[in-house]
Amino acid sequence: MTVTYDRKTEIAGQLRHVDKWYGQHQVLQDVSLAIGSGEIIALVGRSGSGKSTVLRVLAGLSDDHSGERLVAGAPALAFQEPRLFPWRTVRTNVGYGLTRFRLPRGEVASRADQALADVGLADRADAWPLTLSGGQAQRVSLARALVAEPQLLLLDEPFGALDALTRLSMHGLLLELWHRHGFGVLLVTHDVNEAVALADRVLVLDGGRVVHQTEISDPRRPTGSPSPQTDQHRAELLAQLGVQI
């Protein structure tokens, strides 16, 4: 299918007619999508549908695909597992996100501290990762992704391992940072409720193809109350995923 977007919007990331194979198995088939600056796009699909592969292509972690990849600047990536270095302090873990810039050590520390303040962890800068809760570790991972001020943030099910209350807190934090910095977001998730709560558009991936798009005309966001359309969007997406409710 053709994925539409407002062509007046500056594009943070885009794929055009991307195909990718693993051996004899084609995992992406003619995938085209675009993430506008200041837009949150959610990508949902069954296990094995190719969601994480789409994210890897956009992140520049794949160079054996066909089609076009267009990205503004260097995208930032955060995973379901925080993947923090246990031998580094929280501050130096966040500063690792600036490695490619070869900045003076003092500037790296200053920018890392600001990123930690943004995610509410200024007081844990000298802590070790193993002393953090799951939610705190995920906040550090988000700070590390955002410290370089990317125009595109790629999230691979970053809240899936968190308990329900911590997950809602992280939703609120993501939206706060998104409002503040205006980056584009591609959120890969298996949770339809999360997709409807956070995204401006939700794309459904099936068999390596984008087969459906739902426009969320009035995203409720976690801080608001569900709109009358929330259940409709949810039912529409679940039907596309083959789930009957």
Image: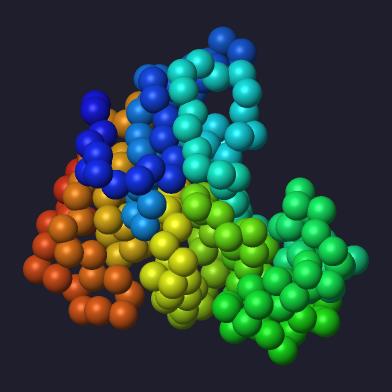
Numbered circles on residues, count: 0
The N terminus, quarter of image: top left
Q: Residue furthest right?
A: 87
Q: Is residue 218 left or right of residue 58?
A: left
Looking at the image, which residue is at 26% across and 34% down? 3
- Front residue (pair 134, 17): 17
In this view, the residue in front, 51 or 239, is 51
Quarter that holds the C terminus: bottom left
Residue at x 72%, y 71% (from the top left corner): 112
- Residue 126, horizontal then vertical, whole percent: 83, 82
Q: Above or below — where is 80 with respect to 63?
A: below
Residue at image location 37% in from the left, 57% down from the top: 38
Res. 188 in view:
yes
Left or right relative to 4: residue 53: right
Indicate whether 51 appears above or below 238. Answer: above
Quadrant of the rendered image containing residue 17: top left
Report the side of 153 relative to 6 (left or right).
right
Q: Write the residue at 62% across / 28% down.
A: 62
- Picture coordinates of residue 213, whole percent (x, y): 23, 41
Residue at the limit of the structure toward the top, as seen here: 24
